[in-house]
Image (spheres, rainbow, N blue to C red):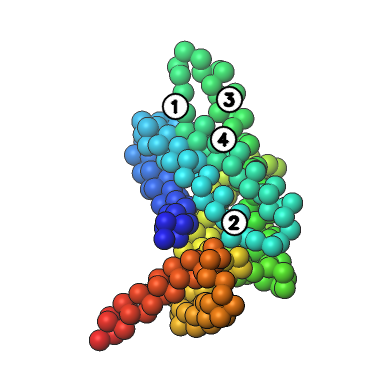
Amino acid sequence: MEHKIERKMESMFGLLGIIIALSFILTAAILTPGYNPLLNTVSSLGEGVAKTLFSIGFVIAGSLGIPFFIQLERELINIKESIRKLATGVSIFSCVCIGLVGIIPDKSYLDLFFAFHYFVAIVSFAGTSAYIGLYSYLMYIGSSLISYTGPKFKRYLSYLGMVIVIVFFLLIFSLQPIVEWILTILIIIWILITSIQMLSFKFFNIPGVYYKKADYPKALNKFEQAFEILNHLELTDEPIMKTLEENISFLKGKLQDSEKEKQ
């Protein structure tokens, strides 16, 4: 059952990464004397007394974001493959840049550092807004495409993704610190909701089959029927038989646990 655990862990990376990053960044803002989000940018926290917390927050967010978005690509199956791959490529590059945002400045080369910092910061915002927009588009059309067999993400998540793209352009034109903070918070909320929705689905290692916990009885019935059919056809040596056995065992165990909890 290692593949199931790995997929669950990859989804958890997004949730834990964004919670830890948010906690560290907000703590850095609180500890920085005179800090005002209306007047000061997020990046300016990297120059304050709590710059270490700022650094750790961004490094964690960037590092844990990579496996999370690779997993998200796997969830969005059978839908606009070119866009899906583009979104994942942009997300990985953006996560690397987010990690680089957390580099603490070297006082000996401040001019060079700030040029580098502002470059990766702009790329991070632009890339993040781009891949969120692309993923949101895939989530939106996925709910209506017959060919799409992945989890059904909530429509409001797609709308939030489009809002993020709009706010990014507002930031480019206004360059206001408060707009940067609004964009940062919206991005955090989008990743948080996405990771929670991914965790609410169970992937059974069979392309296109996703179920929530409430659907476990239906899933068990389908897997048992498929197992009986393959067994009747004497296809017991096929790899899918092992997968079916694993999932049947998993579902029976979960349903038994549920019955015990009710008692």
For mark 2, what is the residue?
74
The amino acid marked with disc number 3 is: Phe
Residue type, label 4: Cys
Residue tagged 4: 97
Mark 1 lies on residue? 104
Q: Secondary structure at mark 2?
A: helix
Which residue is farthest bottom? 263
Residue bearing mark 3: 116
> Separation of disc 1 and disc 2 at Cα?
34 Å
Q: Which quarter of the figure is the N terminus placed in? A: bottom left
Within-10-Å neighbours for mark 3: few <14, some 14–19, many 20+? some
Q: Earlier in the sequence, mark 1 or mark 3?
A: 1
Of residues 193 and 181, the one drawn nearer to the viewer in this rendering = 193
Position above or below: 205 against 9: below
Left or right of 255? Residue 89 is right
As measured in the structure, the alpha-carbon distance from the residue carrying label 1 to the one carrying label 3 is: 12 Å
Q: Nearer the viewer, residue 250 or 45?
A: 250
Give percent across and percent down for residue 124.
Answer: 59, 39
Residue 250 vertical placement versus 187 (above, below): below
- Badge 2: how crowded within 10 Å, few (<14), some, or many (20+)? few
Residue 189 is at least partly visible in this image: no
Q: Earlier in the sequence, mark 1 or mark 4?
A: 4
The mark nearer the N terminus, 2 or 3, is 2
Q: Nearer the viewer, mark 2 or mark 3?
A: 2
* Distance of label 1 from label 4 (alpha carbons): 14 Å
